[in-house]
Image (cartoon, grey):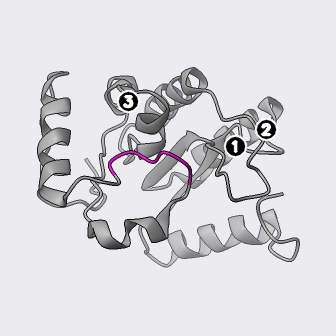
């Protein structure tokens, strides 16, 4: 439903496997509660992620955008997203798992909750404020009005409030 018919799931998964085999740092993931997504798909998705062993696993709740065909759809569940972050951390102890802006958008402490559930990556919005309106994936996106320095300062304080600190060295995957 979210991808053009000519872009089959099998082909997309095959492309991920080829990228990983050729040495690229590879990521995969899914939107929890996206239109057409069913709870029954979870086992298949989790098994695929376990098999692929991606370097990054991005999951977050689906948030409808007012200007799309999905505007009237129900958003994804924060609780289910956090439980999946925890499961994925247990299954993939070395993976980079972002605390997405989507979890922070649907819950004021969503990113902190994601970190406490097992996420280990935060990605501040460093785009110039003047161009952020061109990348509004969903309504009410977190941190769209803050300057990069303000966003970083706020994010740093939030992460410290739960007993962690932001590290600004390498951001790529490293085997531990």
| Distance from the alpha carbon under mark 1 to that under mark 3 | 18 Å
Q: Which residue is mark 1?
A: 45
Q: At which x and y percent is residue 29? A: 58, 50
Q: In this image, 169 relative to 122: left or right?
A: left
> Which mark, residue 118?
3
Q: Residues within 10 Å of mark 2 (few under 14, many from 20)?
A: few
Q: Which residue is mark 2?
A: 41
Q: Residue at x 77, y 40 (%)?
A: 73
Q: Residue at x 48, y 42 (%)?
A: 102
Find out whether the residues at labels 2 and 3 contact each other: C-beta distance under 8 Å: no
| Distance from the alpha carbon under mark 2 to that under mark 3 | 22 Å
Q: Residue at x 48, y 45 (%)?
A: 140
Find out whether the residues at labels 1 and 2 contact each other: C-beta distance under 8 Å: yes
Task: Pick the residue in front: 127 or 61.
Answer: 127
Between discs 1 and 3, the one toward the N terminus: 1
13 above or below 113? below
State which quadrant residue 166 falls in.
top left
Find out whether the residues at labels 1 and 3 contact each other: C-beta distance under 8 Å: no
| Distance from the alpha carbon under mark 1 to that under mark 2 | 6 Å
Element at label 1? helix
Q: Residue at x 44, y 66 (%)?
A: 133
């Amino acid at each position: 439903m979210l991808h053009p018919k000519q872009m089959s799931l099998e082909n997309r998964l095959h492309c991920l496997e080829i990228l990983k085999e050729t040495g690229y740092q590879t990521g995969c993931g899914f939107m929890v509660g996206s239109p057409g997504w069913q709870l029954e798909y979870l086992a298949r998705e989790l098994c695929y992620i376990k098999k692929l062993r991606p370097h990054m696993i991005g999951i977050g709740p689906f948030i409808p955008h007012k200007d799309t065909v999905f505007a009237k759809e129900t958003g994804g569940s924060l609780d289910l997203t956090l439980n999946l972050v925890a499961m994925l951390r247990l299954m993939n102890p070395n993976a980079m798992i972002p605390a997405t802006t989507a979890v922070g958008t649907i819950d004021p402490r969503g990113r902190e909750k994601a970190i406490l559930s097992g996420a280990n990556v935060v990605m501040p919005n460093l785009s110039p404020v003047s161009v952020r309106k061109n990348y509004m994936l969903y309504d009410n996106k977190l941190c769209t009005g803050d300057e990069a320095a303000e966003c970083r300062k706020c994010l740093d304080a939030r992460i410290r409030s739960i007993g962690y600190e932001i590290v600004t060295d390498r951001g790529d995957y490293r085997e531990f």
